[in-house]
Image: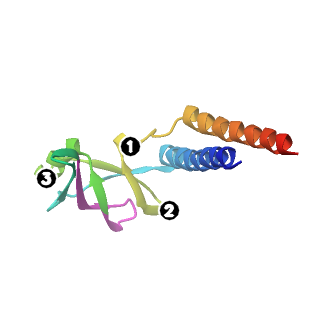
């Protein structure tokens, strides 16, 4: 009885997360503004290891940019390795932000993370779990 419930729960959670991320993507596409990030003064390198081998490397730093309204915004953010050199050398790096909440921002390369296909897939997982749950309920009566 618990298996179909967990399938439903997982499908529902991922569907809701997918819809939220899709809505964020649309907000950035429609209302997103561009700002130039100031040169990066320092960053932290985070290395995750599994045994003796490196599993992943992440770079984090405090990024500062000025909005169209003149507000200076500083956010701690993961920095893609491809942009790290540009930020350190002072080359132009553009960040997208939402004017009503500039602390909600992303690099241009982060657009389009979730497609409609993923939302439909996890929605169908939820429906399969729901049907499975209903069948199990009827068979127990």
Outermost residue toward the top? 117
Query: Disc 2 vs disc 3: Cβ atoms closer than 8 Å?
Result: no
In the structure shown, which secondary structural element does the residue marked by tag 1 occupy?
Answer: helix
* Tag 2 residue: 100
Front residue of 7 and 113: 7
Q: Report how many numbered discs are placed on residues in the image.
A: 3
Q: Main secondary structure of the magenta part?
A: strand
Within 10 angstroms of label 3, few (less than 14), some, or many (20 or more) residues? some
Query: Residue 141: percent from the left, percent from the top?
Result: 88, 45
Q: Is residue 134 left or right of residue 120?
A: right
Q: Which mark is residue 110?
A: 1
Query: Disc 3 vs disc 1: Cβ atoms closer than 8 Å?
Result: no
Circle 2 or circle 1, nearest the eye: 1
Residue drawn at 64 percent across, 37 percent down? 125
Query: Which quadrant of the structure image shows residue 102?
Result: bottom left
In the structure shown, which secondary structural element does the residue marked by tag 3 occupy?
Answer: helix
User: Which of disc 1 and disc 2 is earlier in sequence?
Assistant: 2
Front residue of 96 and 120: 120
Relative vertical location of residue 72 with respect to residue 39 in this rendering, above or below = below
Query: Residue 106: percent from the left, percent from the top?
Result: 38, 51
* Tag 3 residue: 88
C-alpha distance separating marks 2 and 1: 19 Å
Residue drawn at 18 percent across, 45 percent down? 54
Query: Residue 25: percent from the left, percent from the top?
Result: 50, 45
C-alpha distance separating marks 2 and 3: 29 Å
Magenta segment boundaries in residue numbering: 56-75
Outermost residue toward the front? 140
Residue 70 colored magenta?
Answer: yes
In the structure shown, which secondary structural element does the residue marked by tag 2 occupy?
Answer: loop
C-alpha distance separating marks 3 and 1: 20 Å
Within 10 angstroms of label 2, few (less than 14), some, or many (20 or more) residues? few
Q: Is residue 136 left or right of residue 116?
A: right
């Amino acid at each position: 009885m618990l298996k179909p419930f967990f399938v439903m729960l997982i499908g529902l959670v991922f569907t809701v997360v997918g819809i939220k991320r899709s809505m964020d993507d649309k907000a950035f596409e429609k209302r997103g503004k561009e700002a130039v990030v100031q040169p990066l003064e320092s960053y932290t390198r985070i290395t995750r290891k599994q045994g003796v081998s490196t599993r992943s490397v992440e770079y984090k730093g405090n990024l500062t940019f000025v909005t169209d309204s003149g507000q200076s915004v500083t956010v701690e953010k993961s920095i893609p390795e491809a942009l790290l050199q540009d930020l350190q050398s002072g080359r132009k790096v553009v960040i997208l932000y939402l004017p009503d909440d500039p602390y909600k921002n992303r690099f241009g390369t982060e657009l389009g993370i979730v497609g409609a296909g993923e939302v439909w897939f996890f929605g169908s997982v939820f429906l399969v779990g729901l049907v499975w749950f209903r069948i199990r309920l009827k068979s127990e009566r």
